[in-house]
Image (cartoon, rainbow, N blue to C red):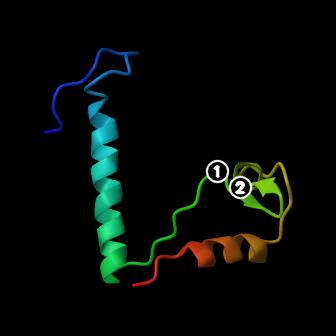
Amino acid sequence: MFGRADADGVFGEFGAPRWKQRALYDAMKDAAAATGIVRLARVSIYDEVGGIRLDDILYRKADVPAETVAALVSERVAQP
């Protein structure tokens, strides 16, 4: 469905089928959010909340009030 793949460990012309599948699924989610069917917020483990990476918050390496994280998500929610 997603074409041929490069050999394991090779980042060349074809990439990996799973990456292509993931990109398709992300595009479908973005399209659903754009039409208002779902609410979607894209966040990354590299995003910072109060100067602390979200990854550290999620793995409980740092203590940040839930309301502060909720504010980050709320500002990222796609609006139709």
The image quarter containing residue 68 is: bottom right
Q: Residue furthest right?
A: 63
x, y percent for residue 4 = 17, 26
The residue indicated by pointer 2 is: 54
Task: Using the image as rendered, state which of residue 80 and residue 69 is in the foreground.
Answer: 80
Q: Is residue 61 left or right of residue 47?
A: right
Amino acid bearing label 2: Leu
Crowding around mark 2 (Cα neighbors within 10 Å: few <14, some 14 to 19, many 20+) is many
* Residue in the picture at 47% in, 76% down: 78
The image quarter containing residue 69 is: bottom right
The residue indicated by pointer 1 is: 45
Which quadrant holds the C terminus?
bottom left
Give the answer, above or below, for where 27 lies relative to 6.
Answer: below
x, y percent for residue 75 = 61, 77
Q: Secondary structure at mark 1?
A: loop
The answer to whether mark 1 and mark 2 are in CB contact below 8 A is: yes
